[in-house]
Amino acid sequence: MMNRNNCRQRRRAKKLYLVAALLPVFFCLPCFTCLAADTDDMGYRIAREADRRASGFGDFTAEMEMILRNRQGRESHRRIRIRAMETENDGDKSLTIFDSPADVKGTALLTHSHKSGDDDQWLYLPALKRVKRISSRNKSGAFMGSEFSYEDLGSLEIEKYTYKYLGEDSLNGHDCFMLERYPKDKKNSGYSRIVSWLDQDEYRLWKEEYYDKRKRLLKTLTLGDYQRYLKTIWRVRFMHMVNHQTGKETDLIWSNFFFRTRLSSKDFNKNSLKRAR
Amino acid sequence: MTRAIQVVTCVAMVFFLFSSAENGNTTELTGSATLEGRLFPHSPAYQNQKDQNGSLALVAELYQGFPSGSSAIISPFVRFDSSDPQRTHFDFRELNFFYLGESWELTTGISRVYWGATEFVHLVDIINQADLVESLDGEDKLGQPMLHLAVIRDWGVVEGFLLPYFRERTFPGKNGRLRGPLVTDTSQAIYESGAGQHHIDIAARYSCTIGMCDLGISQFIGTGREPTLITGTNISGEHVLIPYYPQISQTGIDLQMADGEWLWKGEAIYRSGQSRSFAAATIGFEYTMYGLFRSAMDLGMIGEYIFDDRDETVSTPYDNDLMAGLRWTWNDVDDTNLLVGIIKDLENPSLILTLEGSRRLGESAKVEVTAVFFAETSENDPVYFFRDDDFIKVEIIIYF
């Protein structure tokens, strides 16, 4: 599959190159940019549609288990709970509560994500009963030592990327859109680009490839076990991330989704962070 | 007042114990056991002090959550120490009932509250007494009986505290290290207030978030947590230090701000009632480099400065000091991290080096190593007392 996509991309690039070479320079330049603008626009429109379909949940709570596996196959487990809500004109608010391993039990992370600019983040340290503001710039850092980074798990605000439509592809029996996104915050993101496969019927994400800043393939994410909630919202329940450069893997297993649980902004302030259990 | 809080807490506790079978309630019992070994490589400066100690600390937490968001908690703590009887002690870290209202919260019973922003010295934090025998940094606190009301509004949080019973600071005993030539005799503690430990202290705090800034303003009126140590004699006629707890008023302000990779922190206090009025302030930053050398590792740099306008006779070693730290986080499966710190007095040659490292062992244990070196100790600085007290501490924590 990968090879076919690569071939297709290369063929398309070659075609473009040929077209460009055949045209006089004064005509070629505007044409090339308008072609690029088209694929950009298409990419953005797909991302926006996927975002539109994934939103409107209001609020939800869920549980997640992480299974970290090193190259030798040694496993390590983490359990966390997540509460999140959408806000009117800004990014989502979320509360992440750590249940295991035992030494981090009771630690909680509050995030107010923003459509533009840095997110606000606070960490609650139960041993000291202390709420500490932390820098949200740590996008490329490993989340709890896993192969998922903060930016992989954070609220995906479409404004934080630029997009390019790559074409169509078939994956696991789904006709998919392939698109590429580029982080606008180049300095703090761990990626140069991310290639995504979304099915054309429901705009669900099935696969992503992450390229590091040296443009080498870093990680591949595959997703599955989608379940529909509130008639329209699809939620993934299994995510598998492989780091090709280290051989390490992480599985994420989501469970116990509850939607519209009447969470409000009162459940996402520093006081609620302190009493989160 | 004390009686009233005791009664309310007892009623709440009984309610909590008998209601645990109800639907929607969550009961949790967690805890940990810490095995600690401390080694002091230099022979002691004062008589009776030991070169090493082994110690076991147990902490348990029984939590009961109600569907309404209210909860009750009982958290006893006990330490057994092989060489210093003063370190062998018991405390209720928490024993309270927490009521969650529509936009307010009420805690009644023994609880812990943290105020402040900086990493090395904690000026503003005053509600709970330091459990000094636990650690030198004062981050371990004794449980404080309180009635604590927090009103949460869009424009900030207003909190009021009634503190009906005073907790005395713990001090190392005759056999303990990290003390001066005279042992502090806590049994003779004296108070400025005629009510002694039963003086009702009050405190208030306003805190809010403005953009990327967290701000807190606090006021405390009551028995000072930090005693003035005066010389006296004990029943056997030996010279000792006697803690004197004055009535003080302390105004505090704390600030933390995130600006990209930079975190800015500051705390300042103004205290009156303890000899002459004085002010103290600490400011600092934390800057983190993420993904060091294209790895998952982070390296954080911490820089803080403290100024305290009290003269040298007072118990603080931090009068005009610069602190710097490097925090190395591996971001690996075992959560390995290392913090190396240096505290330099700017007026005398005193220099302290600290090292703290920790790493998870399997899924439910952790090892922590702490080392403190009093590299240079000026006779004009209270750290002079600790000149032979360099130590290495290893702790194994097992969670259950």
Image (spheres, rainbow, N blue to C red):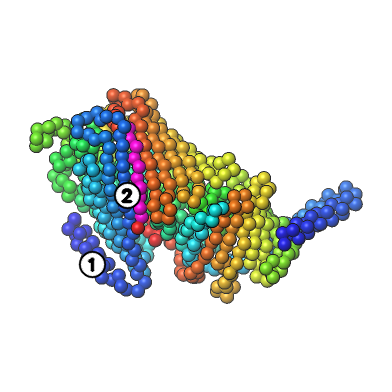
Q: Position of residue A256 (x, y in %)?
A: 48, 69
Count of marks placed on residues = 2
Q: Chain of mark 1?
A: B
Q: Position of residue B390 (x, y in %)?
A: 32, 32
Q: Is residue B126 left or right of residue A74?
A: left
Residue located farthest toward the bottom when viewing the structure as drawn: A231
- Mark toward the viewer: 1 or 2: 2
Secondary structure type for disc 2? strand
Q: Is residue B388 magenta?
A: no
User: Is residue A148 in view from this perspective?
Assistant: no
- Look at 30% across and 30% down and name the residue there: B42
Quadrant of residue B350 within the rendered picture: top left
> Residue beneath label 2, please?
B34
Q: Position of residue B320 (x, y in %)?
A: 36, 30
* Camera-nearest residue between A158 and B374: B374
Range covered by the magenta-colored residues: B390-399
- Look at 32% across and 56% down and name the residue there: B31
Residue B14: give its label: 1
* Camera-nearest residue between B397 and A148: B397
Q: Is residue B396 magenta?
A: yes
Quadrant of residue A163 within the rendered picture: bottom right
Is circle 1 on the same chain as circle 2? yes
